[in-house]
């Protein structure tokens, strides 16, 4: 809050923004608010925006009165139509990347050989991984569109963007404060709806997709923006930025352009500050220009004709195209778009309020200045001409991406604030503070506080990235390099440049650590500048070294390599026949999606050598063909249909009388272990007989079994030896802090507790046996503490939750009874 909310007077209050309607969402009344301190100082994004909208009304009505146009207007409005860009990636890829989780962008990762060179993503349908969801055959973007419509925000556009996995949605135009609210809501809706469908949403990673709003999540391909289409107009319907169909409209348009040119020229640095952030640092027509010169030289304000024209396609089969006289300049940060200006530099993760507030402020400044010239005796035409003459250097309709433009901009006296710290330093200039105070948008104190907040945000973002980068290198990248080198002992020619490439990583890492530890703490300004100018280049150098090494490291086990096949089947309970569906029709498309090149290496995962193979059969045997295995399954189902023993038993299949959660590698069907009829037990199985969270399929299945079948017993069935727990024990005892599969994270706690009880001298097999029992109790505690339904039924003695251990060597089941501290968990 920049010191506006100190400890001894920390009260702050919300108040309804009455110009933005409240709505009901998930049975909760949501009220758009402003947020101010006990002394009325704004500490939010919304309050300055609302103040700037008032400033537009004051300055706009003053201008209209001075030039004698639209004098019947009683109020002014500012409008916003945002274009939200974002990426959608696999949740598994997201969770496997500490940099994405911590920083929102990948800090390492070389470009794949095929990425966005052909712009294929831009010109094809929305990919299946975005369009098809697990539970509903709806488009993810359609769901978001429907949810936004429920709260009064019609979405008008959805399409792919240039980069793989990149998309965009945008709504219809609305008043600026309402539109800003809806943008924040849209980002929330995208993640909320993903979570409902079992997709990825923080803080828990589930299967599915993850929406990334960072400005540059992947280096080397396009970043994401939030183009802010902004305009102002009167309550009578006059748009200041529409050339108009009559004389008054045409004059107002030229006048408004002059006012905007004044604001952009005089307060250029202020506009740059609104899009200054650590994330945005990574991404960042001629007809009117000629007309402006004619006005300066004495021509009339009505000389500009923004008339639409016909463009021929050159062929008889296609109709002509109706086009405006000027196209939008996509290389400009603030181009004209026919009836509005598009602030293209806004970052995709930003709140729109801040940049739109400054657009309103500089336009208000321009309108007030032009009004003062007319009020001082100048004619309307001469006042416009004077402003154009003094501020024409800010209008450029050429190629803003060309190497010549920075040189030309320098000649015109325009500032080049190409980093966030450079931009932030200008925020508290005297002219900025004076303007914001005169417009009653910010007090001097509030302007200075905003600068402090901007510095703090930049510093915290950079520090998080550096610390994550160091940790990833030390705990993941260097160990992988060492293991790769080990494979080439005695084969120097085969190893090639690996040794020098991997050692270069260590060299750059040490330089980064040294520079980061030397950052100053004397002031926020010095710290931000040091991080930008000294530490950031070293981050780039370390990334380059790691990305070079990535092309040399051995790939891990993955579906794309062909070592694993993923297929589906459906069992028909009436015919008792299995229909094999084969692979996904979109498998090729999904596997070609290579924008996240960081692939998990399962040889380093904690499961290495600890699969079922390592316990029950020779792990050195060649991997079986997926087609041979499928043939075996098909033959088995035919025997089942032909009258096998279990088929006869299925004919008298009973209603479940109990529910059992067992481990996937237990080696025997639960029905056989307990010698019951098929269907008498509602069986669930996963690796480690674990339940990690309240929103997953295991917990949902438990609740379904008690509600649908009224089962009186839930049994958590562990077993020994257990491959999953063996992996957890190894992961716990591993000296390297290496990444492990998501599953092991929930089992390592049991392994750690087993070692605490048995001592560090205990063997791995001893720990596995003890951890099996402890893990059963952990699972019992999880389901009892996280399901209100199950807890209520246990408290009412309508349900019993117990544990047991199956010993594979003997076939015996040891029943463990209830959770020892069950009564404590049942306390209201």
Image (cartoon, rainbow, N blue to C red):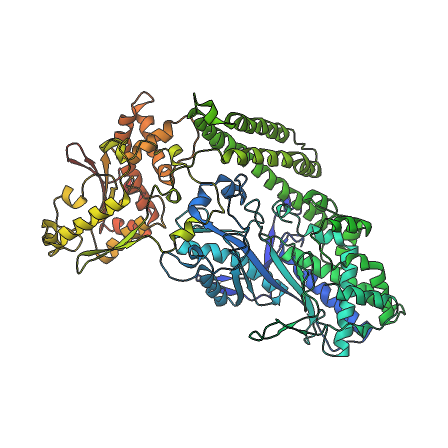
Q: Quadrant of residue 52?
A: bottom right
Q: Is residue 526 above or below residue 511?
A: below
Quarter of the image for residue 438 reads: bottom right
Q: Nearer the viewer, residue 731 or 783?
A: 731
Hey, which residue is sitting farthest right in the picture? 377
Percent from the top left, x then y, of residue 152? 52, 68
The residue closer to the viewer here, 726 or 442, is: 726
In the rendered structure, the answer to whether residue 683 lies left or right of residue 150 reads left
Residue 66 as seen in the image, left or right of residue 141: right
Q: Position of residue 138 (x, y in %)?
A: 40, 62
Q: Residue at x 44, y 51 (%)?
A: 209
Please, is residue 114 above or below residue 473 in the view?
A: below
Question: Could you tell whether 733 is left or right of 632 in the image?
Answer: right
Q: Is residue 667 above or below residue 255?
A: above
Q: Position of residue 487 (x, y in %)?
A: 41, 26
Q: What x and y, as percent, mark residue 253?
A: 75, 70
Q: Name the residue rendered at 39%, 44% in the picture.
A: 560
Q: Residue furthest front?
A: 315
Can see residue 13?
Answer: yes
**Near-viewer residue (247 or 441):** 247
Q: Which residue is rendered at x = 22% and y = 39% of the image?
A: 666
């Amino acid at each position: 809050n920049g010191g506006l909310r100190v400890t001894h007077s920390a009260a702050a209050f919300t108040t309804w923004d009455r110009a933005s309607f409240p709505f009901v969402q998930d049975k909760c009344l949501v009220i758009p608010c402003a947020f101010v301190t006990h002394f009325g100082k704004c500490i939010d994004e919304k309050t300055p925006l609302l103040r700037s909208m008032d400033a537009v009304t004051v300055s706009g009505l003053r201008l209209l009165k001075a030039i004698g146009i639209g004098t019947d207007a009683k109020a002014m409005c500012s409008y916003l139509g945002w274009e939200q860009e974002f990426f959608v990636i696999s949740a598994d890829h997201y969770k496997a990347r500490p940099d994405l989780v911590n920083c929102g962008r990948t800090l390492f990762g070389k470009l794949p050989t095929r990425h966005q060179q052909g712009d294929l993503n831009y010109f094809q349908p929305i990919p299946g991984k975005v369009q098809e969801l697990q539970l509903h055959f709806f488009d993810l973007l359609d769901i978001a569109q429907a949810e936004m419509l429920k709260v009064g925000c019609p979405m008008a556009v959805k399409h792919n963007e240039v980069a793989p996995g990149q998309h965009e949605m945008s709504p219809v135009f609305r008043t600026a404060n309402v539109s800003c609210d809806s943008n924040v809501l849209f980002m929330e809706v995208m993640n909320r709806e993903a979570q409902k469908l079992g997709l990825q949403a923080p803080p828990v990673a589930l299967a599915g997709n993850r929406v990334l709003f960072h400005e540059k999540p992947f280096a080397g391909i396009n970043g994401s923006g939030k183009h802010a289409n902004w305009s102002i107009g009167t309550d009578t319907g006059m748009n200041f930025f529409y050339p108009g169909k009559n004389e008054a409209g045409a004059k107002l348009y030229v006048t408004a352009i002059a006012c905007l040119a004044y604001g952009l020229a005089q307060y250029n640095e202020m506009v740059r500050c609104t899009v200054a952030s650590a994330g945005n640092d990574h991404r960042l027509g001629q007809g009117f220009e000629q007309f402006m010169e004619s006005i300066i030289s004495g021509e009339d304000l009505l000389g500009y004709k923004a008339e639409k024209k016909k463009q021929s396609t050159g062929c008889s089969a296609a109709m002509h195209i109706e086009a405006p006289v000027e196209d939008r300049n996509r290389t400009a940060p603030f181009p004209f778009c026919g009836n509005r200006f598009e602030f293209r530099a806004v970052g995709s993760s930003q709140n729109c309020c801040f940049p739109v507030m400054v657009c309103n402020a500089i336009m208000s400044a321009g309108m007030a200045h032009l009004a003062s010239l007319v009020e001082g005796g100048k004619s309307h035409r001469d006042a416009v001409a004077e402003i154009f003459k003094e501020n024409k250097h800010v209008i450029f309709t050429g190629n803003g991406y060309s190497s010549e433009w920075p040189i030309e901009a320098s000649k015109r006296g325009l500032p080049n604030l190409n980093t966030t710290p450079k931009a932030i330093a200008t925020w508290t200039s005297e002219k900025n503070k004076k303007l914001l105070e005169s417009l009653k948008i910010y007090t001097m104190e509030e302007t200075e506080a905003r600068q402090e907040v901007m510095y703090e945000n930049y510093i915290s973002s950079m520090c998080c990235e550096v610390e994550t980068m160091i940790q990833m290198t030390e705990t993941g990248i260097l160990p992988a390099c060492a293991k790769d080198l080990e494979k080439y002992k005695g084969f120097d020619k085969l190893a090639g440049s690996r040794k020098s490439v991997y050692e270069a990583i260590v060299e750059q890492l040490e330089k980064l650590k040294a520079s980061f530890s030397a950052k100053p703490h004397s002031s926020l300004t010095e710290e931000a500048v040091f991080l930008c100018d000294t530490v950031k280049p070293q981050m780039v150098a370390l990334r380059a070294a790691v990305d070079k090494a990535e092309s040399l490291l051995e790939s891990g086990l993955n579906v794309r390599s062909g070592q694993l096949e993923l297929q589906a089947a459906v069992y028909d309970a009436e015919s008792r026949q299995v229909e094999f569906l084969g692979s996904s029709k979109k498998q090729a498309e999904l596997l070609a999606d290579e924008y996240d090149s960081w692939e998990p290496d399962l040889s380093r995962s904690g499961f290495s050598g600890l699969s079922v193979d390592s316990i029950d059969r020779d792990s050195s045997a060649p991997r079986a063909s997926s087609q041979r295995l499928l043939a075996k399954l098909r033959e088995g189902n035919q025997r089942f249909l032909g009258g096998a023993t279990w088929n006869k038993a299925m004919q008298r299949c009973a209603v479940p009388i109990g529910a059992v959660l067992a481990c996937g590698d237990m080696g025997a069907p639960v029905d056989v272990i307990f010698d019951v009829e098929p269907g008498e037990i509602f069986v669930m199985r996963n690796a480690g007989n674990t339940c990690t969270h309240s929103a997953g399929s295991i917990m949902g299945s438990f609740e379904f079994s008690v509600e649908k079948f009224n089962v009186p017993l839930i049994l958590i069935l562990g077993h020994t030896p257990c491959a999953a727990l063996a992996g957890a024990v190894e992961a716990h005892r591993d000296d390297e802090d290496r990444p492990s599969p998501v599953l092991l994270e929930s089992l390592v706690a049991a392994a750690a507790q087993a070692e605490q009880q048995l001592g560090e001298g205990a063997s791995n097999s001893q720990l596995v046996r003890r951890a099996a029992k402890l893990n059963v109790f952990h699972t019992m505690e999880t389901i009892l503490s996280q399901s209100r339904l199950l807890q209520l039924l246990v408290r009412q003695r309508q349900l019993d939750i117990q544990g047991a251990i199956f010993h594979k060597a003997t076939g015996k089941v040891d029943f463990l009874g209830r959770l020892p501290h069950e009564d404590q968990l049942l306390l209201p």
